[in-house]
Amino acid sequence: MIPSESPLDRLNYYNGQRLESSDLRLEQEYHMRVRRWLNKSLYTWGIAAGLEVNVKKTDDGKEAKHTVVVSPGLALDQQGREIILLEPRIIQVVGTPTKDKGIVLGNYLTIQYNEAPVAVIEDGCTIPLNEKKNNNLAWKGPKRMRAEPKISWQNSWPNNNSNKIVLAQVALDETCSLQSIRPWVRRYVGAAQSPKSLAYALEGEKDITKENPKKIYFHIRGGRPNAVTLYLKGDRFSTIYYTELGKHNHVMNLTIQDLTIPAHDHRLGELTTSPEVEKIQHNVFALVEHNPPELRAINVVDMDDLGERETSDVKRLLKMDISHDPPNHYHVIESGGATEEKEEESLEITVARSSLDDAGASPPGVHLNDNPYTYINNLEIWLNEKPYTPEIISRLGWDSLGNGNREHELNEKGTGPIQLDLLADLNEGLNILELKVGSSGGKIHYNLYVE
């Protein structure tokens, strides 16, 4: 049966109260018991910091054969008492030599809580308690109690109820000289109870537009969390969205007015026919009108049967040199000929609808904007379908979560920690964090910690 503790009493002060030593001890006891209960409720027993065991160095820098040094540090025993070593302590090594290599029995160095009285007063002064009686109380007793840890060797592992904490185990050779120090036998303090909620962290980034809000799904498992913390930082909208276009076409509406074509004609350069090797016979066709106008009546001239016309007449009319020297010959038409002059005229051309080469249609959902997206403007934070933006910007001391400019604090330094658990009641199960913008678009980096 576990012995019951005495009630947890403390002094109730009032004016004119007489205080004796028992009252002051009660006051100390109250604070020590409360602190020790807190220690053993929050932590398991073991080494909290320091208390390392190392071989002592001699004056010439060599390792001593029979001495170790325990460094300052802190440990908690099974009763929650603080074991504090303020100064390094030199300990003489004692124990059982190791007969079989690698096997060490005993030789455990332990530390435990200990306190002892100091500054004892034993003068002969007395204090009369009652003038009518002789039962006077003398001044006598320790003036102070000093907490000084006790460090000792033990041949077996200490019992858990002994309030001793193992610092190290040493191996000794046959001459009882120190061979090695084994620190892996040490036990360190830990949390007295494992956290109920499963702790984890989420990290990522989202490109957000008005048409494309983003959702972050996170689960809470094991009970209500201690804290759910969100960090946000803005950045420029990803340009990767502008590097790939879907299959599409371009439609063009074109109108051209008052197109004036001035008076003009078309000039001919010198033309030479290819040599012929066949029978010399030519048909000359007047396909265009020429000056002088006499040529307009001539349609076909057979060079083998000129009839009444002389070769010189044909040459004069056509400005063509004719040679009848077989077998090869050619014809030269002089340059300078021109088509009939065309009068000035105005044209009006209207293309109502025209398409370039078809590259296909744009995929559904593609948003086209006059200006490219840059930075977040008026970010909204929704948690489990409820808006919490006003509360968040109020705690940040901002006017908004982004204004579309790079210089905004959201982009420069980020929001810092946003305690979502203080804004909403977050319990076990699925939770949804939604990020929206009212206009424009941008990138947001996020870190979400569930603890």
Image (cartoon, helix red, strand yellow):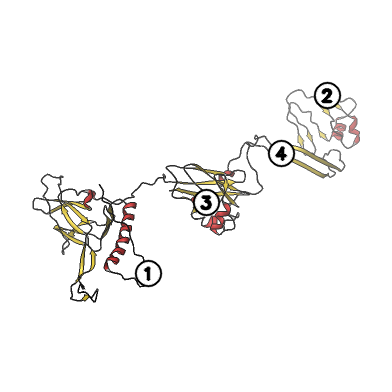
The residue type indicated by label 1 comes to Tyr
Quick one: SS at disc 2? loop
Q: Is residue 30 positioned above or below 445 on the image? A: below
Residue, disc 4: 251
Give the number of the mark in front: 2 or 4.
4
Q: How many neighbours does mark 3 have within 10 angstroms: few (below 14), some (14-19), or many (20 or more)?
A: few
Residue 405, image x, y percentages? 59, 56
- Upstream in sequence: badge 1 or badge 4: 1
What number is the disc on residue 423? 3
Residue, disc 1: 14
| Mark 3 to mark 2 CA distance (whole Å) | 112 Å
The image quarter in which residue 343 lies: top right
Residue 33, image x, y percentages? 30, 58
| Mark 1 to mark 4 CA distance (whole Å) | 95 Å
Q: How many neighbours does mark 2 have within 10 angstroms: few (below 14), some (14-19), or many (20 or more)?
A: few
- Upstream in sequence: badge 1 or badge 2: 1
Residue in front for this viewpoint, 40 or 378: 40
Residue 114, image x, y percentages? 22, 60
Q: Is residue 451 left or right of residue 46?
A: right
Give the number of the mark in front: 1 or 4.
1
The image quarter in which residue 348 lies: top right
Residue, disc 2: 304
Residue in front for this viewpoint, 158 or 322: 158
